Image: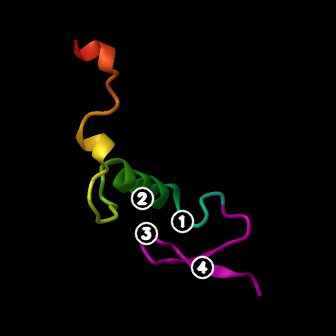
Amino acid sequence: MPMEIKCPKCGRRVRWEKNEWRPFCSERCKMADLGAWVTGGYRIPGEPDDESAAGADTPDDEND
């Protein structure tokens, strides 16, 4: 019997083997999930890093 899984985005049952979008059921669900990551829809709660809060991605010599 072929292995089936639930699509993590919509919950639809889909075959694992020969599924080019696995673990998703379709390209649509795959892209919707990617969009949620890009826009910050998935977040891990916690305090911000000291470096990111202080703007550490700007070199010191440019601030002078």
Does the magenta segment cover residue 4? Answer: yes
The residue beneath circle 3 is: 9
Could you tell me if the residues under marks 1 and 3 are in contact, i.e. CB atoms within 8 Å?
Answer: yes
Residue type at mark 4: give it.
Ile
Q: If you read the primary sequence from the N terminus, does the residue marked by circle 3 or circle 2 appear first?
A: 3
Q: Distance between the Cα atoms at labels 3 and 4? A: 12 Å
The range drawn in magenta is: 1-19
Of residues 3 and 40, the one drawn nearer to the viewer in this rendering:
40
Could you tell me if the residues under marks 1 and 4 are in contact, i.e. CB atoms within 8 Å?
Answer: no
Q: If you read the primary sequence from the N terminus, does the residue marked by circle 1 or circle 4 appear first?
A: 4
Q: Residue furthest right?
A: 1
Could you tell me if the residues under marks 2 and 4 are in contact, i.e. CB atoms within 8 Å?
Answer: no
Q: Residue furthest bottom?
A: 1
Residue at screen point 34% across, 64% down: 44
Element type at marker 1?
A: loop
Left or right: 25 in relation to 29: right
Q: If you read the primary sequence from the N terminus, does the residue marked by circle 1 or circle 3 appear first?
A: 3
The numbered mark at residue 3 is: none
Residue at screen point 48% across, 72% down: 8
User: Residue 53 in the image: x percent, y percent?
Assistant: 24, 43
Q: Distance between the Cα atoms at labels 1 and 4? A: 9 Å
CA neighbours of label 2 inside 10 A, class few (<14), some (14 to 19), many (20+): some
The residue beneath circle 1 is: 24
Q: Distance between the Cα atoms at labels 3 and 2? A: 7 Å
Residue type at mark 3: give it.
Lys
Q: Is residue 49 above or below residue 33?
A: above
Q: If you read the primary sequence from the N terminus, does the residue marked by circle 1 or circle 2 appear first?
A: 1
Q: Quadrant of the C terminus?
A: top left
The residue beneath circle 4 is: 5
The residue beneath circle 2 is: 33
Q: Distance between the Cα atoms at labels 1 and 3? A: 7 Å
Could you tell me if the residues under marks 3 and 2 are in contact, i.e. CB atoms within 8 Å?
Answer: yes
